[in-house]
Amino acid sequence: MKTDGAPTISSAPPTSFQLFLGFLGIGIIGFGGVLPLARRMLVEDRRWLTPDEFVDLLGLCQFLPGGNVINISVAVGMKFRGWRGALASILGLTAVPTAFVIVLGVIYDRYRDDPHVQQVFAGLAAAAAGLLIAMTIKLVRPILTKPAALFIASLLFFAVAFLRLPLLPTMLVLAPLSVLLAWRLRP
């Protein structure tokens, strides 16, 4: 039940089939980047995670090799149904996009010099950028009340966006600093 306007977690853990269907839906409609859609499905629609849990999970998955959403699907599946849930989640997420990529790869290879095809890809890139901006705004909201987290996020953004430092070494330096700050500033 909501008491402070924040979304609550669904009381019943999802089954492996529900995990498959949830991530299948993301895979079907997630053109140009599915992280914003994954957040919407996990936090707002199905309420399997709180906004803070999603941010924490995303932070963890940023460190792991591979795509963030794939890592999140495995982690969410593991959380609720163990390896079967992880397998169901990743199969749901990747089944349809894999088929699309194969078909589009064949079409793109044949028509890549057509100006209409190039315009379609330019439009898809703009839509993907818009989705990322919208998700960034949603991700920042939970940490606005946490000055240390906001400081670390700003520091990482500045280091990567303006100083052009490589992401992984920067995260390896800032992650221990973030943990230390969280530990020192705990209530």
Image: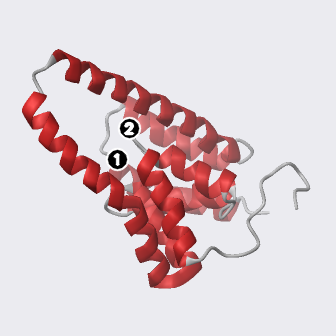
Query: Is residue 111 shown left or right of residue 36?
Result: left
177 versus 75 height, above or below: above
Question: Could you say where residue 118 lies in the image, as x and y percent from the top left?
Answer: 21, 21
Nearest the eye: 60 or 172:
60
User: Mark 2–mark 1 contact, CB under 8 Å?
Assistant: yes
Question: Could you say where residue 147 lies in the image, as x and y percent from the top left?
Answer: 69, 44
Q: Which residue is mark 1?
A: 167
Q: Which mark is residue 160?
A: 2
Query: Is residue 64 shown left or right of residue 150?
Result: left
Q: Amino acid at mark 2?
A: Val
Query: Image point 35% across, 23% down: which residue?
Result: 123
Query: Image point 88% across, 62% down: which residue?
Result: 1
Query: Is residue 30 shown left or right of residue 179?
Result: left
Query: Image point 55% across, 38% down: which residue?
Result: 136
Mark before the other along the chain sequence, 2 or 1: 2
Query: Image point 28% across, 48% down: which residue?
Result: 100
Question: Could you say where residue 25 lies in the image, as x and y percent from the top left?
Answer: 49, 54
Q: Amino acid at mark 1?
A: Leu
